[in-house]
Image (cartoon, rainbow, N blue to C red):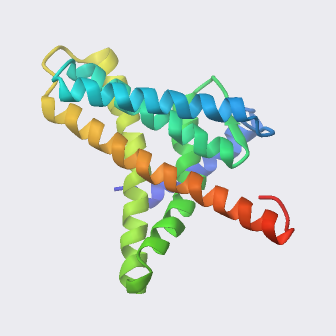
Amino acid sequence: MLDEQRIKEATTNMKHYLADKLIRKEPFKQIVFDTYMNNHKESLSLAEHMHTNNLSKLWIVVVSYYSMFYIANAVIYKMGYKVGEKLAHKVTADALITWARTKLKTSLLEDYEAAQEEALELADTKANMIVESFDQERKKRSFFQYETTEEIKAGKATTSFERAKQFSTEMHKLLEEGKKKKNENAQNGGSKN
């Protein structure tokens, strides 16, 4: 579970990352966004193919993680920021915890409007779990890629693939929410997001 200490650590780290330009404000370019989304879709599709055909457990974990990494960066990019090359995976994880977690919670609350009080608790827990799944997969991918032998368990690869699918679904919701708000503002002659 994503705990308060990890949330505080991520928030503190983001201040340093911004100061050190490890993540920076950047004007939106469709080609950058499309590249993230295409890489996400290709990675998720490849992970599904490997999982379905019972291919390399190591690469199911690695490619599932990368599908999450790419769509997370697409969401961060839509928020107006681009993660640099240095420490990109850690910066992405901390940006999700610091910025996307709140947006996820709001998005999930809309899904559960009928049961407000119950939904708040559930949405907070689920938002934390979704963001934490990225951090867990980042650590697992590094461990599996560099520190394990061929004795990797099949269950871990399946977990990685399932997390990647769920993460993808939730990140797509955030991207759609941003499109809706932009369209509403354009129709109302309001300000840009």
| Residue depicted at x 68% and y 30% | 32
Total marks drawn? 0
Above or below residue 125? Residue 157 is: above
Asked if one can make out residue 134 in the rendered structure from this viewpoint, the answer is yes
Q: Is residue 58 above or below residue 101?
A: above
Residue at 49 percent across and 49 percent down: it is 171
Q: Quadrant of residue 49?
A: top left
Q: Nearer the viewer, residue 170 or 105?
A: 170
Residue in front for this viewpoint, 155 or 142: 155
The spot of residue 114 in percent (x, y) is 40, 85
Quarter location, residue 53: top left
Q: Is 38 on the left or on the right of 163, as rendered? A: right
Q: Is residue 62 above or below residue 2?
A: above
Residue 37 screen position, x and y as percent: 55, 35
Residue for point 43% across, 77% down: 120
Judge from the rendering whether residue 123 lies leftward or rightward of residue 50; answer left or right: right
Farthest residue toward the front?
A: 187
Relative to 29, is 11 above or below?
Answer: below
- Residue for point 73% across, 45% down: 80
In which quadrant of the rendered image does the N terminus lie?
Answer: bottom left
Residue 63 spot, x, y in % from top left: 37, 25
Image spot of residue 172 (x, y percent): 50, 50
Horizontally, is 109 left or right of 27 in the view?
Answer: left
- If the image is split into quadrants, where does the C terminus sit? bottom right
The reply to whether residue 13 is visible in this rendering is no
Viewer-closest of 143 and 177: 177
